[in-house]
Amino acid sequence: MGTDRATPARHTWRWAVTALAALFLAGPASAAEIVLELSAVDKLVAQGLFSNGGRYDLVRGPCSAYLDRPSVSIGNGRVRIRSHLTARVGVPSGTSCMGVAFASWTEVSGKPVPKGGSVVLADIRIDKVDDPNLRLVLESGLVPALPRVVELDVLKSVRGMLQSNGGQFQASVDAFAIESVTAADDRLTVRFDFLLVAR
């Protein structure tokens, strides 16, 4: 997870790892999977983006814009984030903003895809903005930030699981490859294959 920003959420994940017997043998493992339920993905989003007291600042200063009240849904191959946008658009004048206040519900989404040993969001798009005047604010402030919001380092997680196993063998993970990422039914499912070598 990059700088491990979402590490606290890791303990909330529901692990669904198949072929557990293969973890203690040297040889190719059958495809295993990790399942993140909606609550876990919701925590990743909250900790990765809405970390400023439950809000994300798009623009700071007298003329500002921020998102809050996020909710996450997963389905049809995408992770969707709905949130409320509050903005004051205009010209800064000292500590105040000479402009107009806006408020709008928004929805953005991304497709979870493999990237090396991790899963990240790609194909970011703005699905809905109740007030079209605020689309530009989202495009410039939120869209560039979303790829890091749901970033799951699967390889690091598997290695951590092996280290915490405390067995008599020292194991290493080789030939690691993510086979598929599925976003459906409010769950994010990652299937992967690997070669486990025990020494």
Image (cartoon, rainbow, N blue to C red):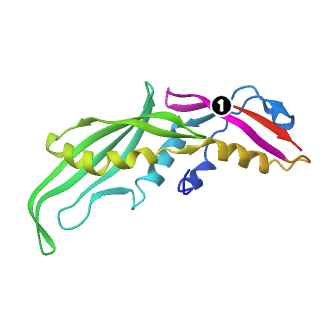
Q: Name the outermost residue toward the bottom.
A: 94
Q: Secondary structure at mark 1?
A: strand
Q: Nearer the viewer, residue 165 or 151?
A: 151
Question: What residue sits right under mark 1 in the picture?
Answer: 192
* Coordinates of residue 14 in the picture (x, y in percent): 63, 39
Q: Nearer the viewer, residue 140 or 5?
A: 140
Secondary structure character of the magenta stretch overall: strand
Instruction: Determine the residue positioned at 16% across, 58% down.
Output: 88
Instruction: Determine the residue positioned at 61% across, 49% down.
Output: 10
Instruction: Determine the residue positioned at 78% across, 45% down.
Output: 162
Is 49 included in the stretch rendered in magenta?
no
**Vertical order, 172 against 27 (above or below):** below
Instruction: Determine the residue positioned at 42% across, 36% down.
Output: 122
In the figure, is residue 134 to the left or right of 149?
left
* Coordinates of residue 189 in the picture (x, y in percent): 58, 31
- Tell me if mark 1 has few (under 14), some (14-19) or many (20+) residues whose alpha carbon lies within 10 angstroms of its own: many
Report whether residue 164 is seen.
no
**Vertical order, 17 against 159 (above or below):** above
In the figure, is residue 139 to the left or right of 21?
left
Is 172 included in the stretch rendered in magenta?
yes
* Coordinates of residue 136 in the picture (x, y in percent): 20, 46
In the figure, is residue 175 to the left or right of 84?
right
Q: Amino acid at mark 1?
A: Phe
Report whether residue 181 is seen.
yes
Position of the C terminus by quadrant? top right
| Magenta region | 171-192
* Coordinates of residue 120 in the picture (x, y in percent): 49, 40
Q: Nearer the viewer, residue 53 or 143?
A: 143
Q: Name the outermost residue toward the front.
A: 175
- Quadrant of residue 154 within the rendered picture: top right
